[in-house]
Image (spheres, helix red, strand yellow):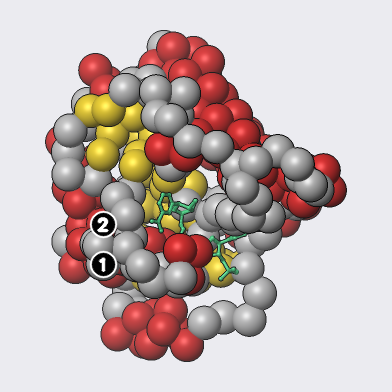
Amino acid sequence: MTGQPAWLILGGSRGIGAGLVEACLSRGYPTLATYRAGRPGALTALEDAYPDQLHLFECDVASDDSVRALAAATDGLAIGTVIFNAGVFGQRTDGFAGSDTADMMSAFNVNALGFVRTLDAFAGRLEGERRHITAITSLFGSNSKPGQGHLAYRASKAALNRIITATAPELKAQCVTLTAFRPGWVRTEMNGMTGDVSPRESGEGIVRTLEAAGPDASGTLLDYTGITLDW
Ligand SMILES: NC(=O)c1ccc[n+]([C@@H]2O[C@H](COP(=O)([O-])OP(=O)(O)OC[C@H]3O[C@@H](n4cnc5c(N)ncnc54)[C@H](OP(=O)(O)O)[C@@H]3O)[C@@H](O)[C@H]2O)c1
């Protein structure tokens, strides 16, 4: 690992997470990335290509113990930026009828509580001049956008958004910038590869926007193209 603080990506195994890992590596950043279980071949290949720059860790953000174990495993490594990318869509529904509450709990546990665990583990130990924590959210969770159904995803992303806006002032006072990102409509397994943006393009845009985002961005919803969006 080089001297500058690392970028930590939670949920780097595939899709947008893999695009974020590639974007960080191509810019020369020390990079820490997590996968859930069974190290994906693509990440192993990147680790082989960037042995001094990329380090992989197992982490399930749905588990308190697993996120604490990640914090312990990375203890002693300087981290400056954390990107919480892990996410699940949950049950797909047209309306509220038939919503499976166990499935909704599961989506909340990953999409919203996973971020709380991440804040708890890492907000107080960031290093460097530019300390930033962000989460990949979705316009499905925005009250400024119309839409119905898919309640597990919408409601859990709305909770994630509110956790960010409610916590950003507190972290700003501790010199940590807290934001959320809309990654674009990205071709990944989550949307059946129907997006119009590649994971690499989205990852590059997010990392580029993060590089330019100072404390004034605290509490904002950013787009991968660099513009600020309404919550
Ligand atoms: N694709 C889009 O157009 C789009 C739009 C808006 C927002 N987003 C958001 O972008 C993020 C990435 O989504 P994607 O499109 O790249 O979907 P994806 O291909 O389904 O990838 C989801 C990622 O989240 C990880 N993950 C899921 N549950 C986890 C857990 N409990 N612990 C740790 N990691 C976990 C997955 O790891 P495994 O490989 O272990 O399952 C995978 O790396 C999500 O937060 C999603 O909501 C996507």
Look at the image and tell me whether residue 177 can be seen: no
Quadrant of the image containing the N terminus = bottom left
The answer to which of 70 and 3 lies nearer the viewer is: 70
What mark, if any, has residue 202 been given in the picture? 2
Question: Is disc 2 in contact with disc 1, using a CB cutoff of under 8 Å?
Answer: yes
* Three-letter code, disc 2: Ser
The image quarter containing residue 156 is top right
**Nearer-the-camera pick, 171 or 92:** 92
Q: Position of residue 231 (x, y in %)?
A: 38, 23
Q: Position of residue 10 (x, y in %)?
A: 51, 55
The residue under label 1 is 198
Residue located 23% across and 28% down the image = 228
Q: Is the shortest distance between ligand 1 and the CB of mark 2 under 8 Å?
A: yes
Compared to 41, does 15 lie above or below? Answer: above
Residue at the spot x=54%, y=54% of the render?
86
Q: Residue 201: percent from the left, percent from the top?
A: 21, 62
Q: Is residue 94 left or right of residue 210?
A: right
Q: CA distance from mark 2 to mark 1?
A: 6 Å
Question: Badge 1, how many Cα within 10 Å: few under 14, some, many 20+?
Answer: some
